[in-house]
Image (spheres, rainbow, N blue to C red):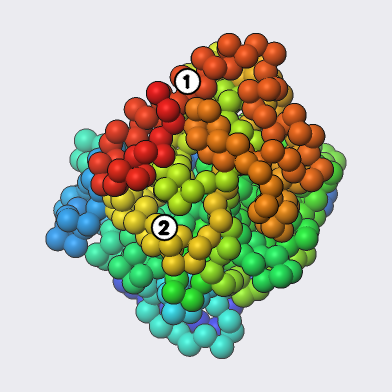
Amino acid sequence: MQAEQTGGKRSSDADDGFARLGIHNINQTFRDLGAEQLIEHAIRRREGLLADDGALVVRTGQFTGRSPKDKFIVRDELTESEVDWGPVNQPFSPQHFDRICSKVMAFLQGSELFLETCLAGADPDYSLRVHVITQLAWHALFAKQLLIRPPPSTPAGQADLTILFVPGFQADPASDGTNSETCIILNFKRRIVLIAGTGYAGELKKSVFTILNHLLPAQGVFPMHCSANKGRDGKVALFFGLSGTGKTTLSADPNRLLIGDDEHGWSPRGVFNFEGGCYAKCIRLSSENEPQIWNAIRFGTVLENVIIDARTRALDFSSDEITENTRAAYPLEFIDNALIPSVGGHPSHIIFLTADAFGVLPPISRLTPEQAIYHFLSGYTAKVAGTERGLGTEPEATFSACFGAPFLPRKPGVYAMMLGEKLQQHKVSCWLVNTGWVGGPYGVGQRMKLAYTRAMLNAALSGDLDDVPVTPDPVFRVLVPQRCPNVPPEVLNARGMWRDKAAYDRAARDLGARFRRNFEKFTMVGPEVRQAAPIE
């Protein structure tokens, strides 16, 4: 090791991070640096530009999103019977893992490397100490901002998890057992994650989430792909939803305290954030619609693939020139009303968010506990034409079990059973909210106004809908309130918003059939949950 720079607080801790991987003969190491120092290194190494508001703007290279077909879990005696093997959790042999790790170690000889010591899990009883080792300074900054920073008084110790992020290394599928030059390999036994051949930082974030989704159920903690906030009355709400449904936007409520925007655990004591930051989509970001996210973009924030004017350093959030999946990564404290430490009590409300591009689901509806489990396992939203290559002119239904199938090592029934137990124990109110289209499908109808969605959520969370009469939806059987403060009554009636009622009926029956076909694989549930399906 030629030279070293360190934050000066965890030198022996950091030594363990390199030693346990067998990394030696490094040109220079930078350990537990502050955000300012990491930004200086990123600029020095030409990894990004400073925007006019101080944010660091970077490019993720060839990949502007996750590479799910290149993600693997090492299959060994520990994982053999616990992992739900298949196209999501692809098996990888221990021998191939050891071989590719050795090649990565050789590749890193003579390199500059960055190491950040972080925590995953705001509840100290369930947190992991994580060493993140990166080739790029901005990846280290991303880890520092997205995970939890240990207090200065935290004693040194061995890492519970080591993440090695090496975008410059490309695997050889023929000899390494990968599907391409890119790989994301999780080794639960050795507690190592290798990310190679991609610069997309979201792989780091979701790898930690996948590890926690495997470990925590055995400790009696329900891991959840959801945002969470807390009212001034102390009541906690959870927001489940896939990308594009409003999970981050709607949880960032100026009248409520933000616990976190994406990943949480529900322990016997209550809810806690897995992370110490937010990873918000920022395509078409505006101060009017999302003021809290807008105000969080400042010095210390990492902006991925946002267009910047190289001369003026002005940002163009409206441009999708590189990708629709532009992102902002910033620490929780950049949100004015963030709750730190990010822990709360047991939730009183659960919101399932869906962006229904078919335009048939009600804007808001109450769910019975059985319907809640049905919609949790279904994990429905819809993609629309133009957002991804290969999509046609019609919306495409997307079902992702537990609103997070790509990150669930265990079978979906494990997580659904935990949800059912929590609902029964804590008497939680559950709601289905459609942030998608009304008055017709995508291309015909209109996207639900954000102001109406916020008004409906405010009414649900404040109890204003508790005594409002409800009408069962004729197809989906969810319970639709007949009125809601600050929302026109006609907006609550999905069918009534369509000019062509026969077309609505056809579209609703078609979507209901898609729900039923998708649910056929969930054989672990009882008849009560199956009866929550849309009618035929």
Q: Position of residue 439 (x, y in %)?
A: 68, 21
Which residue is denoted by mark 2 in the rendering?
A: 419
The amino acid type of the residue labelled 2 equals Leu
Label placed on residue 509: 1
Q: Quadrant of the C terminus?
A: top left
Disc nearer the start of the sequence (2/1): 2
Q: Secondary structure at mark 2?
A: helix
Rendered position, 477 above or below 122: above
Q: Position of residue 104 (x, y in %)?
A: 33, 54
Determine whether, in the image, residue 267 is placed left or right of residue 429.
left
The amino acid type of the residue labelled 1 equals Arg
Label placed on residue 118: none
Q: Position of residue 349 (x, y in %)?
A: 58, 58
* Gap in angstroms between the C-alphas marked 2 and 1: 28 Å
Q: Quadrant of residue 183?
A: top left
Determine whether, in the image, residue 460 is placed left or right of residue 164.
right
Task: Answer whether residue 226 is visible to the viewer in this image.
Answer: yes
* Residue under the point 34% across and 35% down: 519
Query: Dot 1, crowdedness within 10 Å: few (<14), some or many (≥20)?
Result: some
Rendered position, 382 above or below 109: above
Task: Answer whether residue 1 is visible to the viewer in this image.
Answer: no
* Residue under the point 51% across and 72% down: 270
Q: Quadrant of the N terminus?
A: bottom left
Q: Position of residue 138 (x, y in %)?
A: 59, 55
Q: Secondary structure at mark 1?
A: helix
Query: Dot 2, crowdedness within 10 Å: few (<14), some or many (≥20)?
Result: many
